[in-house]
């Protein structure tokens, strides 16, 4: 085991040695493997060494151009069926109670299976790297324009919303905003589908102003009430947008100083003309992709660019990804990876191809359950991901992906994802007493989440050959240690960690009787050791950064 590997190491970044030679470029000074990987982590979901090296050779302009190249037509993974319970409700009323309950359970199970199939397809695209920036933006908009199955209760509407983000997420924010305002899942989630002239519902109006466009402090309570009136009659029927003129309030309204017989479209136009709208969206994008709070000057600069570019998201991202400031030292490897970023990114760096369902369930256990965001604000992200309990579970899930931890072993430990499910666990000293941590949860009474039960039914046997990948050229033990760490970490390799890994590899020579023989000549000895080391390294605090 690697019990002493990371004593006294922390989340702080460690600068080591000179940067690799940079490819010539006039746009991003110092373009190198570290910066290319940074772009892969933020604009996609990580990449292996070969892809990073290719990106260095391409240069930033061509790499960004490729990321922004998306197919205009996206094949549906399957035909998403609407839930039939609404259509059959009259027929069900004629059935005996037990038969009615059985049929409704069947419909709910079918709907749940459809959602699971779709999520497997979506996360599968992240894993295989199909249009990575498009899928990154789908995930961003899923957290920005939040809707949840907890309120929508239908996979069809949630799938259609997800596809809306996929179609329009890299295009015009104006078009996306107008689409979201008519989206059945959104109208159900925020209760606008039941809003009518006599009783306007303010939920959608409030979140439209506060979370989606202007931000707090840029509107008043009277604006919320007037916007709610403007959207009365906007609803859905069987998964399609409908406008009911009889339920709509066509009276005079005043929104942000503009008066008239305003409807929902009028309100959206008014919001897009507000300087606060561009600032709010620019802030959301900059904070998400850079992982740090933007300066006031930087925020104003990008907000102005949004307005000048007619709200084009692709133009905004092209400018951001070719901005030298995007690659500043305080942004490289400085963001706590979300559960999906950690799991998908680890798999991509290692060249693993686990079932997408394992990543969906693993991310859910860690607090990022797709289609079930925790609140209307989505996932807060950042340091909120780094709780003591979740860091332990991340390490175990990394071992699961590597085939070192069986699913049923995770179930036996009754690990849970959030501090709300179990008493908070202090953050462990990095990689100290790894074996003890792996047994820490045994014997504790705790409810078993459904996602953990799903993982417990899986035993992964990954088709990965770290020996073949890392021992080419007969590296020294020190070179092998550094190669493994560079493969796994998005941050510079801490010298103390490199030394500890090298010492462990050298010690293993004696324990295994390898002597002076090369590691690649004994893959049956090398591969288990490298997977053990990879498992332990991925449990490090440093490995949670991207």
Image (cartoon, rainbow, N blue to C red):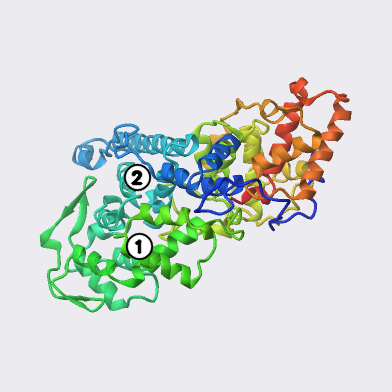
Is residue 468 shown left or right of residue 263? right
1 or 2: mark nearer the eye: 1
State the count of labels. 2
Mark number, residue 124: none
Q: In the picture shown, does residue 228 fall above or below 160? A: below
Is residue 331 shown left or right of residue 296? right
- The residue at 12%/73% (across/down) is 251
Which of 201 and 118 lies nearest the eye of the viewer?
A: 118
Give x and y (percent) for residue 27: 49, 53
Which of 56 and 317 lies nearest the eye of the viewer?
A: 56
Which of 494 and 32 lies nearest the eye of the viewer?
A: 32
Is residue 482 shown left or right of residue 344? right
Is residue 421 at all visible to an observer of this figure? yes
Check disc 1: other Cα within 10 Å, few if <14, some if 14-19, many if 20+. many
Disc 2 is placed on an element classified as: helix
Closer to the N terminus: mark 1 or mark 2? 2
Disc 1 is placed on an element classified as: helix
Is residue 533 shown left or right of residue 241? right
Quote the CA–CA distance across marks 1 and 2.
Answer: 20 Å
Mark number, residue 166: 2
Q: In the picture shown, does residue 306 fall above or below 350? A: below
Q: In the picture shown, does residue 546 fall above or below 520? A: below
- The residue at 24%/45% (across/down) is 239
Check disc 2: other Cα within 10 Å, few if <14, some if 14-19, many if 20+. many
Give x and y (percent) for residue 267: 22, 67
Residue denoted by label 1: 306
Image quadrant where residue 162 sits: top left
Image quadrant where residue 304 sits: bottom left
Give x and y (percent) for residue 2: 79, 41
Give x and y (percent) for residue 432: 78, 48
Is residue 6 at all visible to an observer of this figure? no
């Amino acid at each position: 085991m690697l019990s002493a590997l990371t004593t006294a190491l922390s989340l702080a970044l460690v600068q080591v040695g000179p940067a690799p030679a940079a490819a010539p470029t006039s746009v991003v000074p110092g373009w190198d493997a570290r910066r290319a990987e940074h772009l892969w982590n933020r604009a996609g979901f990580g990449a292996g060494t070969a892809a990073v090296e290719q990106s260095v050779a391409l240069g930033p302009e061509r790499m960004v151009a490729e990321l922004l190249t998306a197919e205009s037509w996206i094949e549906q993974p399957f035909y998403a069926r609407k839930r039939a319970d609404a259509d059959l409700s009259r027929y069900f009323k004629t059935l005996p109670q037990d038969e009615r309950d059985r049929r409704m359970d069947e419909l709910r199970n079918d709907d749940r299976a459809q959602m699971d199939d779709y999520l497997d397809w979506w996360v599968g695209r992240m894993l295989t790297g199909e249009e990575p920036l498009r899928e990154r933006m789908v995930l961003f908009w899923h957290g920005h324009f939040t809707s949840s199955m907890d309120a929508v209760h239908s996979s069809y509407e949630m799938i259609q919303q997800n596809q809306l983000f996929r179609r329009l997420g890299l295009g015009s924010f104006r078009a996306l905003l107008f689409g979201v305002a008519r989206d059945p899942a959104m109208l159900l989630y925020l209760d606008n589908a039941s809003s009518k002239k006599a009783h306007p519902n303010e939920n959608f109006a409030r979140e439209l102003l506060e979370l989606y466009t202007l931000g707090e402090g840029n509107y008043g309570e009277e604006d919320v009430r007037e916007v709610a009136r403007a959207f009365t009659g906007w609803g859905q029927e069987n998964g399609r947008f409908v406008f009911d003129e009889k339920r709509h309030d066509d009276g005079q309204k005043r929104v942000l100083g503009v008066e008239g017989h305003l409807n929902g479209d009028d309100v959206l136009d008014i919001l897009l003309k507000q300087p606060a709208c561009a600032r709010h969206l620019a802030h959301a994008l900059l904070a998400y992709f850079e992982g740090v709070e933007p300066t006031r000057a930087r925020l104003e600069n990008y907000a102005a660019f949004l307005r000048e570019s007619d709200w084009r998201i692709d133009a905004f991202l092209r400018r951001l990804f070719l901005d030298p400031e995007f690659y500043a030292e305080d942004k490289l490897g400085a963001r706590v990876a979300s559960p999906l970023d950690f799991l998908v990114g680890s798999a991509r760096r290692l060249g693993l191809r686990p079932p997408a369902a394992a990543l969906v369930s693993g991310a859910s256990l860690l607090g990022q359950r797709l289609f079930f965001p925790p609140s209307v604000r989505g996932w807060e992200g950042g340091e909120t991901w780094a709780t003591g309990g979740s860091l332990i579970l991340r390490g175990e899930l990394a071992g699961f992906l590597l085939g070192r931890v069986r699913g049923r072993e995770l179930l036996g430990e009754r690990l849970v994802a959030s501090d709300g499910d179990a008493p908070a666990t202090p953050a462990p000293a990095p990689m100290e007493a790894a074996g003890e941590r792996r047994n820490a949860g045994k014997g504790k009474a705790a409810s078993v989440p459904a996602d953990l039960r799903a993982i417990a039914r899986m035993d992964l046997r990954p088709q990965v050959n770290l020996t073949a990948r890392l021992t080419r050229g007969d590296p020294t033990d020190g070179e092998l240690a550094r190669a493994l760490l560079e493969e796994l970490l998005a941050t510079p390799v801490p010298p103390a960690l490199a030394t500890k890994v090298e010492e462990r590899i050298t010690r293993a020579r004696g324990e295994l009787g390898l002597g002076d023989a090369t590691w690649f000549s004994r893959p049956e000895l090398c591969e288990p050791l490298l997977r053990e080391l990879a498992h332990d390294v991925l449990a490090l605090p440093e490995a949670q950064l991207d």
